[in-house]
Image (spheres, rainbow, N blue to C red):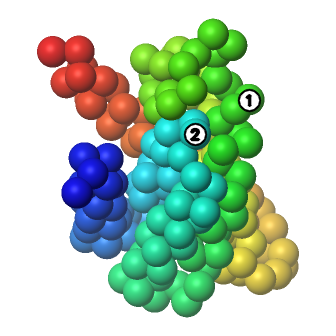
Amino acid sequence: MNFELIKHIILFVLLLLGQALVCNHIHLFDCATPFLYVYFVLMFRINYPRWGILAWAFVMGLGVDVFSNTPGVAAASMTLLGFVQPSLAQLFVPRDSQENLTPSVESFGESKFVWYTFFSVFLYCIVFYTLEAFNLFNWLYWLGCIFGSTLLTVLLILGIEHLTGSFRKN
C-alpha cells in the first residue's frame, strides 16, 4: 500500500471523528461552527489527480452529512471545494516550486497560506450555509454564520498547521 494513501486515510478518519464528536457541538453565538474537515481538502498536493480530490472530498462530505444530519449539504459543498482546490492552490504556489508541492505554511509562506485557507473556507461556508438555509430571508444571520464559521475554521486550521509544522521541523 502507498504511504500517501495511508496518510490520507488516517487524516480522513481523524478529521471526520473530530468533526462528529467535537466540532459539531460547538456553536459560538448560535451561528459560528468550526468546519475542521475542510482542512482535508486543503492538504492535497498540487499535482494530485482532480478525480481523486473530488472522490475524497465527496466521501468526506458524505461522512459529515451522516454524522451531522445535513442531508447532502456538506457533500455538495466539499465536492465544489474539491473541484476548485487545484485552481485555487495554483494561485498561491511560489513560482520556483517543485511539481508535487503540498500546501503548508512552509511551502506557501505564512501570508499566502493564510489567504489560501481563508478563500477556500470562505467559499465552502458560502455554499454550505446557502444550501442549508435555501433562502435569504434572514440574511444578517446568514452572513453572521458565514463570517463567524469562516473565522473560527481558519483560526483552527492555522493552529493545527502550526502545531504539525513544529513537529515536522523537529
Helix, strand or loop for disc 2: loop
Locate residue 17, reporting x and y percent.
26, 67
Q: Is residue 79 above or below residue 75?
A: above
Locate residue 58, reporting x and y percent.
54, 72
Locate residue 78, reporting x and y percent.
58, 65
Label 2 vs 1, first from the N-terminus: 2
Camera-nearest residue between 141 and 80: 80
Camera-nearest residue between 154 and 40: 40
Residue extending farthest to the front is 1
Mark 1 closeness class: few <14, some 14–19, many ≥20 residues within 10 Å: few
Residue that appears at 60% across and 63% down: 51
Q: Residue 44, labelled with which disc?
A: none
Give the residue type that dot 1 points to. Answer: Leu
Q: Is residue 4 above or below residue 80?
A: above
Please name the residue that numbered disc 2 is placed on. Answer: 47
- Viewer can see residue 68: no
Q: Residue 164: name its quadrant.
A: top left
Residue that appears at 53% across and 15% down: 109
Q: Are marks 2 and 1 in contact (CB under 8 Å)?
A: no
Q: CA distance from mark 2 to mark 1?
A: 14 Å
Please name the residue that numbered disc 1 is placed on. Answer: 91
| Image position of 77 (left or right of 18) | right
